[in-house]
Image (cartoon, rainbow, N blue to C red):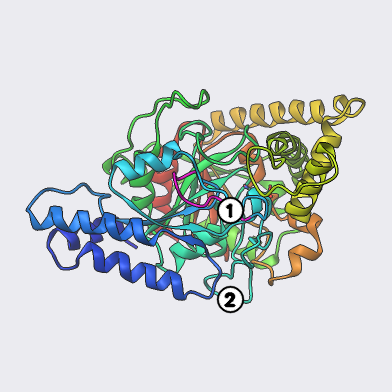
Amino acid sequence: MESQIKAIHQQLVSKQITCTALVQEKLDLLKQNTHNTVNSLLEESALAAAAKVDAKIAKGEEIGLLEGIPFGIKDVYMVQGTYTTASSDLLKNYKSAYTATAIQKLLDAGAIPLVKENCDSFGHGSSSENTIFGAVKNAVDANLVGGGSSGGSAVNVAKDYTVFSIGGDTGGSIRQPAGYNNIYGLKPTYGRISRYGIMAYASSTDCVGPLAKSIEDIRIVLNVMSGKDGKDQTTYASEAIGEESIATIDGVKTVGYFKNFIESDAIDTTVKADFLAAVEKIKEKGIEVKELDFFKSDTLVSTYYTLAMAETASNLSRLDGTNYGNRIEDKNLKETYAVTRSENFSEETKRRVVGGNQVLSQGFSDAIYLKGLALRDQIAENFEKDFQEVDIILSPVTPAAPPVIGDSLKDPLAMYLSDEYTVGFSLGQLPTLTVPQGTVTGLQITAAKRNEEQVLKFANFLKDTL
Ligand code: GLN
């Protein structure tokens, strides 16, 4: 698939289509869709923005590459004046007071947001069933889950309801739904894109990233959103990645994969066979492939969930009905907080808040939380060593095909374990891209920190190789 952004830009400039007609067509598709991808539509503002783009073109003025391109936004991003619900009862009526930096950069480039997209509430989940707006249905087979937590975003892109969407990835929430719906999804290096204005889940691994149907569109959107931001102290300045610099494979000589990922009990036999077949094709192209040792999947999953739950318990403590959200009054202030939170948070969110507070509480924090932090350091060190030996780490995205709607809700532990291939790269803060090739849920390409260029290079190579 070639760049849709470039194709649409060409059509707009050559007056083959109007921006208004394009935006209207996508809004109609979103309205009629039965996959539960929409939390709210931004119809009025989108049509007004489209009219402005059309007026510019009519006057013969130049337009930028992203100008007039319709996109979607996971419903955890602040966009001033829009409902920002995090798919929760608590924030069902909450409207953003300001706009997230990453989204503002896209608005400044002229891209047009159409929709706030359905997702697991507060990013808590791997299936987009933990939402008050109805389970997101998979783009390929509507009986299956859309994946999570950025499920609405992935399905909208896969179904061409949006040209690209902006998801959020704390432990896999861009990469896994991208894999479940056969599209591209990038989790950049932690800090490359500002987190200012994304609702915090686990601040130490939260990342902003794009989902799209081509590598080129991922590159374009990534470049626009990247950069240092005074409002997020963890951001760093990065250079734009050029189209030519990712066209060739030079610089990528060695690829590694984790033996234990492939030998895990959980992996589906077809996923395993397909992954190993992809490895063979890569070898045939003259690239060296090495087996690497890594932490056991259950260690990765428990380290991630220990830290993620601790951080979310802390981040969500501000949501007590005082400053934000649906307040439920009770006999005194303490009861008001308790009732507001217990009535308005989902079962899954409450499980994480309770778990997180336990992990952080006196008497437990040394044994659990501090141990989690130490393990995270060891995981990061392991990656550093690996990247002295290999240029790219390749892995499956998930151990199996997407589950049927309903199954994950019955067994949260099984859902957590299905994140075994994505969470490690989050703890390592590495750039990781899902490509829709290789296995039924795609492949994950990971490089050393700040090396998105290498990731996109290898994605182009795989596109021609597999
Ligand atoms: N599935 C993982 C979780 O529930 C990741 C979610 C995310 O990246 N937001 O924590």
Q: Is mark 2 within 8 Å of ligand 1?
A: no
Which residue shows up at 51% across the image and 52% down it? 83
Residue denoted by label 1? 93
- Magenta segment's dominant SS is loop
Name the residue tied to disc 2: 142
- Location of residue 249 in the rendering, given as x and y in whole percent from the top left corner: 37, 44
Residue occupying the point 59% across, 70% down: 137
Quarter of the image where one finds residue 222: top left
The Cα atoms of the two marked residues, 1 and 2, are separated by 29 Å
The correct choice, above or below, for 108 with respect to 37 in the image is above
Q: Quadrant of the N terminus?
A: bottom left
Q: Earlier in the sequence, mark 1 or mark 2?
A: 1
Of the pair 333 and 148, the residue shown nearer to us:
333
Q: Is residue 35 magenta?
A: no
Residue type marked 2: Ala
Quadrant where the image shows the C terminus = bottom left
Magenta segment, which residues? 78-87
Q: Kindly check if marks 1 and 2 are in contact, taking CB atoms under 8 A apart as contact.
A: no
Is the CB–ligand 1 distance for label 1 below 8 Å?
A: no
For label 2, count other residues whose C-alpha is less than 10 Å away and answer few (under 14), some (14-19) or many (20+). some
**Dot 1: element:** loop
In screen coordinates, is 116 left or right of 131? left
- Dot 1 crowding, Cα within 10 Å, few <14, some 14–19, many 20+: some
